[in-house]
Structure formats: structure tokens, C-alpha cells
């Protein structure tokens, strides 16, 4: 009953569970606390917090911001104030930028005769629309067998319907999170395919911008990998966090909070550090 999951997506970004639905699911799994960490927005938090109060589940406000190091790096922000003006300005800017790119992708698809209308996507998927939503449409249209296939054939860099969007610099993501009162945490450190020296360089660069924690437990990480990350976090004086990166049906291979064994004590340490 002391397990938590601090990395979860909802329909506010590219997850398939509503914020309230996510809370119900977490409760069913017997979790004690969760964090809502949608891409580029904290707009799912209010609904999740309400459901959390009703069902007796602690809900932590969070966000996940994509940045650029020498590759894409994701920075999580915990205990950001979801209503902070500074945060809203940035997230609205990110959404506008996404919108521009997304409209172009939708136009490319429409030009190929696919029945894709961006306004309809907005109605169906909400504010933060990303490549996963386009991938989902391609699967529905029978052009791909599943999400992975849709990405590999159409949505990954170099493929037909890939278009880049503006990515914030690493320092800027830390600054945004700190200005909104939150703690910047390096997400899923093994996803960047860095060698040991590269990972240290990334951590040290982040530390210069105010990094406070590192995600040490994550779906698919082996006990050896987890031990390695925990040792590294301790060496650098970083707080430890962990989460599944659950997206619901959008990433059916990633379950919520199962087998990660992220202890509640880690959340207590985060709270003390805010
Ligand atoms: P966007 O921010 O709209 O460019 O989309 C990026 C999102 O697409 C990431 O957060 C991932 O969730 C998802 N994604 C990227 N590559 C893949 C892939 N190969 N398969 C499935 N999902 C992917
Ligand atoms: Fe995602
Ligand atoms: Fe991520
Ligand atoms: Zn994520």
C-alpha cells in the first residue's frame, strides 16, 4: 500500500485515460500516490486532484517537458503550481507551436487523400496533440497495424508525416519548472542511449541548471540498471523518483504502477525538498 507511480499521462496530453479515470485505476491498483506528468501541460491536474480527494489517493502536480541536449531529453517537474502565470504562458506557447506543426501534418495527410481534419482531432483529442494521435488515426484507417508500426512507417523522423516542432533548450525547461515552484527531475535516463560518460555529462549539465532529481525506476529497467541509477543519484545528491510512463491504450505495453516498487518515502523526500 506504500507504492506510488510518479510518471503518468492522461488525455490532457497523449494518454488515453482521463485524469479522473487515471486516479480510479491507480486506486484499484492499490497505489498510495500518483503524479500526473502530461507532456507540455499541467491542465489535467485539477480534475485528477478532485478525483483523488474523493477516492483517497494523493495526487502530485507534475509536467514533462521535452528539451534538447545533443538529443531529445525529457525533464519532469514535480510540485509545479499548475496555475502559475509563468507556466501557463510557456505551456500555451508550446501548444500553439504544436498546433502549427500539427496543422501541417494534417494537411500532408489530407493531400494524400486521407480523411484527416485537424479541427476534428482537436475535438476528439483535446489541446495537446502529438504524433501519437496521428499514429492512432493511421491505425484506425488501416494504414498501420499498430502504433509502433505507424510510427516506424509514417511518424518517425525521416518518414513521410514527420515534422519537427520547436523544442526548448535544456536550461529553459529547468527554469520554467523552478519558476513555477517545482523540482526539475531527469526523466528515464536510459532512453537517451548515452554511454556512462555521456549520461554523466548530461547530469552535470542539468545540475548547472538546477536539476534536483533523477528517475531511477522506470518501466523495463532491470534491477542492475535501477541500482546503477540509484547509485548515480546518490553520488550527485539527487532525489530519486520512479514511474511507469503509463499512457493507457496509447501504449498498451506499459502498465500503471506495477512491479516498479517506487516507495512512498521517495515522495516524502521530494515534498521536503520543494
Ligand atoms: P510529438 O511530441 O508530438 O513529436 O510526439 C512525441 C511522442 O511520440 C513521444 O512523447 C512518444 O510518446 C511518442 N513516440 C515517439 N516515437 C515513438 C515510437 N517509435 N513509437 C511509439 N511512440 C512514439
Ligand atoms: Fe507520450
Ligand atoms: Fe518521456
Ligand atoms: Zn512520459
Image (cartoon, rainbow, N blue to C red):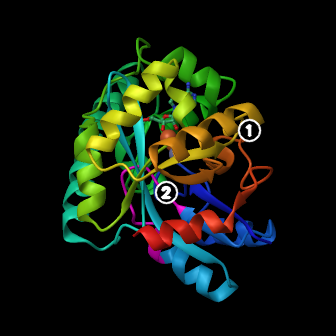
Q: Which image quarter: residue 108?
A: top left
Residue 64, magenta (yes or no):
no
Mark yes or no: residue 53 visible. Answer: yes
Residue behind mark 2: 37
Is residue 16 toward the left or the right of residue 261 in the image? left
- Dot 2: what SS? loop
Residue behind mark 1: 253
Q: Position of residue 3 (x, y in %)?
A: 74, 64
Mark yes or no: residue 97 visible. Answer: no
Say above or below: 43 vs 40. Answer: below
The kind of secondary structure the magenta stretch mainly shows is loop
Query: CB of mark 2 within 8 Å of CB of mark 1?
Result: no
In the drawing, what numbered circle is on residue 147? none
Q: Earlier in the sequence, mark 2 or mark 1?
A: 2
Say above or below: 208 vs 42. Answer: above
Q: Residue at x 68, y 46 (%)?
A: 249
Assess mark 2: CB under 8 A from ligand 4?
yes
Amino acid at each position: 500500500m506504500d507504492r506510488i507511480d510518479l510518471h503518468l499521462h492522461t488525455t490532457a496530453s497523449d494518454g488515453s485515460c482521463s485524469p479522473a479515470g487515471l486516479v480510479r485505476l491507480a486506486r484499484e491498483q492499490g497505489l498510495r500516490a500518483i503524479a500526473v506528468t502530461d507532456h507540455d501541460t499541467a491542465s489535467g491536474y485539477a480534475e485528477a486532484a478532485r478525483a483523488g480527494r474523493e477516492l483517497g489517493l494523493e495526487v502530485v502536480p507534475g509536467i514533462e517537458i521535452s528539451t534538447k541536449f545533443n538529443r531529445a531529453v525529457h525533464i519532469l517537474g514535480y510540485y509545479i503550481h499548475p496555475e502559475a502565470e509563468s507556466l501557463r504562458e510557456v505551456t500555451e506557447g508550446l501548444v500553439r507551436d504544436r498546433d502549427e506543426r500539427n496543422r501541417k501534418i494534417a494537411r500532408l495527410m489530407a493531400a494524400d487523400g486521407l480523411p484527416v481534419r485537424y479541427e476534428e482531432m482537436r475535438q476528439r483529442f483535446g489541446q495537446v496533440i502529438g504524433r501519437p494521435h496521428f499514429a492512432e488515426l493511421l491505425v484506425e484507417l488501416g494504414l498501420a497495424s499498430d502504433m509502433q508500426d505507424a510510427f516506424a512507417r509514417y511518424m518517425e523522423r525521416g518518414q513521410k508525416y514527420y515534422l519537427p516542432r520547436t523544442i526548448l533548450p535544456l536550461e529553459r525547461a529547468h527554469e520554467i519548472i523552478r519558476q513555477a515552484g517545482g523540482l526539475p527531475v531527469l526523466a528515464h535516463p536510459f532512453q537517451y542511449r548515452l554511454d556512462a560518460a555521456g549520461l554523466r555529462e548530461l547530469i552535470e549539465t542539468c545540475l548547472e541548471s538546477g536539476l534536483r532529481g533523477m528517475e531511477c525506476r522506470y518501466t523495463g529497467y532491470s534491477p542492475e540498471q535501477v541500482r546503477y541509477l540509484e547509485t548515480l543519484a546518490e553520488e550527485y545528491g539527487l532525489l530519486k523518483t520512479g514511474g511507469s510512463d503509463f499512457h493507457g491504450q496509447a501504449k498498451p505495453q506499459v502498465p500503471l504502477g506495477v512491479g516498479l516498487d517506487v516507495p512512498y518515502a521517495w515522495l516524502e523526500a521530494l515534498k521536503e525538498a520543494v
